Image (cartoon, grey):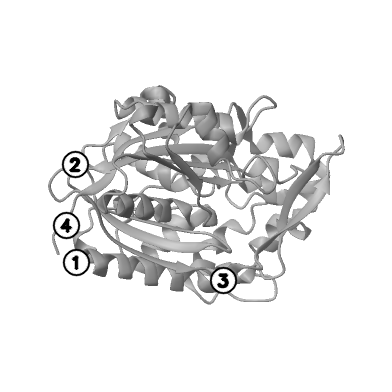
Amino acid sequence: MVHFPVGIRSVALSFPTIRRTNNYYIEKYPELIAQTEQKGLARLFSLTGTTPNNEFDMEMLPYLSDPFRGTVERWLLGHEESSLTLEYRAATDALNAAKLSVNDIDLMIVASVWPEQIGFGNAAFLARKLGLVGAAWNLDATCGSTPVVLQTASALVRAGEYRNVLVVISCSYSRVCDEQDTVSWFLGDGAGAFVVSSLEGNQGILGTKTVHTGALCEVVSTDLTKDEQGNSRLRIQTGKDAKALRETAAEFLSICCEGAIASAGVTLEQIDFFLFNTPTAWMTRFCTRLLGINPERTIDLYPLYANIGPVLTVANLYHAAHLGKIHENDLVLIYASGAAGVASASVMRWGNVVLAPHLLESSKLAEKSL
C-alpha cells in the first residue's frame, strides 16, 4: 500500500496564569497534610493491604511517603480564564505557526477534559470564537484523546475529505475538582493545538493501535453538585476500583506500543524517541522499564505540569522538539491512556514541524528544572 504522508504541521501550547507549588497546600491546609494518607490522592495511589507485584507498583513505591505523590507544581485557571480561553490561544498560535488563517481550516476537532458547559463540548463555542466557517466537532477519549484525534484527523486528510484539520486539546481539572480534595493536588490545567496536513516523503503517521479502557470505568466518578452561587457543577472523585490503574497499566502499554510498531512496519529498536503521557511522577520510569528502553530516549514533563490529561501528549511533542530531542525524519512513538476512554499509541515520522513561539521564552526557564 502506498503511504500518503499526513501528519503534524505545527504545534502550540497554552497554560493558565496561576502557578501552585506544594508550599501553597502545606501552608493553607496543614490539617489535610497531616491526614493525607486517609484522603483521595493516597487512596488512588496506595499499596495498603497489598505488596508490589508489577512494574507499576515498583516504580510507584518510592513516592508513597510523599503526600503529593511526587508532584512538584501545577498551573491552574484564574477567575477570568477558562478551557475556551486556553483553547483559543493555542488554536490561534498553531494556525500562525503553520502560516494558515482560520479560512484555510476545513475541520476542527476538539477534545476538552472538561468542557465548559455540562452536556455540551467546546467545539461549536470555540469555532464561533475563532470565526471558523467549516466543520467542527468534539471527540472524547478522556486522557487518551490526543493519539486518537491525531489518528482521526490524519485518516480524514488521507482520504481526501479535508485538507487542513485543526486539532485542539484542553484540560481543566481545577474546574471539576475542589482544592480541598487531595486528588486535585496532582492535577493541572492547560491546552494544546496542532494542525494536521499533508507532509513530505514518508513523513507523518505510519501506524496506530488503540484499545478501549473499559477496565478503568470505576477508577474515577463524577457527581453533579451546586456551588456557592447555586450553579450546577461537575465534581470528580476517586472511584471504588483505583487499583485497576496499577493492574492494567502494563497490559495497555504493551498492547498499544507493540501494535503501533507492528502497524508501522518498524521495530522497537528503530524508534528514535518515545513520548509517553506522564500523569504520575513515575510513569516515565514505568514505561521505559517495561519496554526495556534507555530513559534518554524519552522526556518527563511531570515536574513542570503535573497531570494535565490529554494535553500531556501535546506538551511532550512540543518540549521534545524544542529541546532538540526529536528532529525531522526521526521515528517517534507516542502513547497515552485514560480511564473510561482509550489507550492508544502511534508511530510517526516527524516532519518539519513549526513550534508556536508563544511558549518558547517561558519554556526555556521551565525546562531547566527537567
Task: Tell me if mark 2 has few (under 14), some (14-19) or many (20+) residues whose alpha carbon lies within 10 angstroms of its own.
Answer: few
Which of the two discs, 2 and 3, labels the residue nearer the N terminus? 3
Q: Residue at x 57, y 29 (%)?
A: 85
How far across and down, in percent of the image, does residue 179 sit? 74, 42
Q: Is residue 81 above or below residue 111?
A: above
Q: CA distance from mark 2 to mark 3?
A: 36 Å
Quadrant hosting residue 267 = bottom left
How far across and down, in percent of the image, does residue 160 sit? 26, 49
Q: Is 349 or 131 nearer to us in this picture?
A: 131
Q: CA distance from mark 4 to mark 1?
A: 12 Å
Task: Tell me if mark 1 has few (under 14), some (14-19) or many (20+) residues whose alpha carbon lies within 10 angstroms of its own.
Answer: few
Task: Tell me if mark 3 has few (under 14), some (14-19) or many (20+) residues whose alpha carbon lies within 10 angstroms of its own.
Answer: few
Q: Residue at x 41, y 32 (%)?
A: 368
Mark on residue 328? 2
Q: Is 187 or 262 nearer to us in this picture?
A: 262
Which of the two discs, 3 and 4, labels the residue nearer the N terminus? 4
At mark 3, the secondary structure is: helix
How many callouts does the rendering have? 4
For disc 4, the marked residue is: 3
Q: CA distance from mark 3 to mark 1?
A: 28 Å
Q: CA distance from mark 2 to mark 4?
A: 18 Å
How far across and down, in percent of the image, does residue 278 sit? 48, 52
At mark 1, the secondary structure is: loop
The answer to the question of whether label 1 and label 2 lie on touching residues, with beta carbons closer than 8 A, is no
For disc 3, the marked residue is: 214
Which of the two discs, 3 and 1, labels the residue nearer the N terminus? 3
For badge 2, the amino acid type reads: Glu
Q: Is 78 or 320 nearer to us in this picture?
A: 78
The quadrant of the image that shows the C terminus is top left
How far across and down, in percent of the image, does residue 91 sit? 44, 32
